[in-house]
Amino acid sequence: MGRSPCCEKAHTNKGAWTKEEDQRLIAYIKANGEGCWRSLPKAAGLLRCGKSCRLRWINYLRTDLKRGNFTEEEDELIIKLHELLGNKWSLIAGRLPGRTDNEIKNYWNTHIKRKLLARGVDPQTHRPLNAAADHHQQQQLQAPRRFAAAPAGHHHHHPDHFAVLSNSPEACSHSSDDEPSSATPPPPPRHLGIDLNLSISLAPYQPQDQTSEPMKQEDDEASATANGAGNAAMTTTATTAAVCLCLNRLGLHGGEPRPE
DNA sequence: AAGACGATCAACCGCAGAAGG
DNA sequence: ACCTTCTGCGGTTGATCGTCT
């Protein structure tokens, strides 16, 4: 395609941000707000590319970031959301107030993956490791099955991958990780008939609404449930229930097109 | 004490899709 | 309808820190 670079690389700093750069960025955004990242560096007097500024702000400088260890509830919520959404870190982050997609992605790769492996659960498929292996073998024998979770590096750029993953019946077939589904043979792809359009059903997390008002979008049950799952105070059990409920509801409401 | 090694996380890169002309 | 530009996302990298030997 030959896209033009996002910035003039010759005249931009790279690597770790200095305190002064941080201060400049914070001051500029406080004064002018977010937006137009491309022109921001120049306006703010920063020798950085816009993408770098955006990343620094979103992942580090924003004032509403929680920072600090993940709680057990957050762990479980991430696991459940990953089971539901796949590697959609930004969507997952949307359910975890004060957490960024980058943070969650890192945390997943460093902690949760290992945690799931220790439980004998495949981090990609969320199936028991044995069953996952068996399932994989079966897939090799059968025609390609799109609902299988894509391996790392091949997840990409398939809008329907999201919905397909979310349709996965195993996502709702067990409400806790210690309930292996290995006894259950890989399900037939009948669930694929359910077109969830899930990617557009998940509204962004709204912190204020969480505490003060239960939910304004009454006509969007899937969204409501997903938002409910974003409450960090939610218990693991409740989280599990919410995610499963979400899937159930999505299954029921699946074919409904959303107004654009 | 020092080097090796692994874990962690901030930052970068490349791409897709949205937005605008 | 097409092209260009911009933004946001997800994967990957590399610097830094902590632990072990």
Image (cartoon, coloured by chain):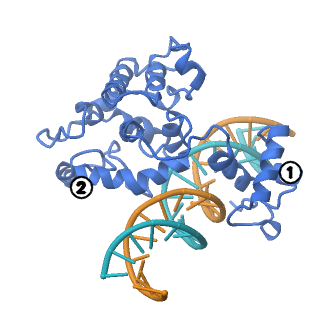
Chain colours: A blue, B orange, C cyan
| Badge 2 or badge 1: first in the primary sequence | 1
Q: Residues within 10 Å of mark 2 (few under 14, many from 20)?
A: few
Q: Is residue A190 above or below residue A225?
A: below
Residue at image mark 2: A140
Q: Is residue A205 above or below residue A258?
A: below
Residue closer to the observer: A213 or A182: A213
> Which residue appears at 32% of the width and 50% of the height?
A123
Residue closer to the observer: A149 or A208: A208
Give coordinates of residue A83: x percent, y percent. 35, 40
Q: Is residue A44 above or below residue A202?
A: below
> Which residue appears at 68% of the width and 52% of the height?
A56
| Tag of residue A138 | none
**Mark 2 and mark 1 on one chain:** yes
Whether residue A49 is visible = no
Q: Residue furthest left?
A: A183
Residue closer to the observer: A21 or A180: A21
Give coordinates of residue A107: x percent, y percent. 45, 51
- Circle 1 — which element? helix
Instruction: Give how far apart the Cα atoms at labels 2 and 1 are.
Output: 54 Å
Q: Is residue A26 left or right of residue A211?
A: right
Q: Quadrant for the N terminus of chain A, please.
A: bottom right
Whether residue A74 is visible = yes
The quadrant holding residue A141 is: bottom left
Q: Nearer the viewer, mark 2 or mark 1?
A: 1
Amino acid type at circle 2 is Gln
The quadrant holding residue B5 is: bottom left
Residue at image mark 1: A44
Residue closer to the observer: A180 or A194: A180
- Circle 2 — which element? helix
Mark 2 belongs to which subunit? A
Q: Quadrant for the C terminus of chain A, please.
A: top right
Give coordinates of residue A151: x percent, y percent. 37, 55
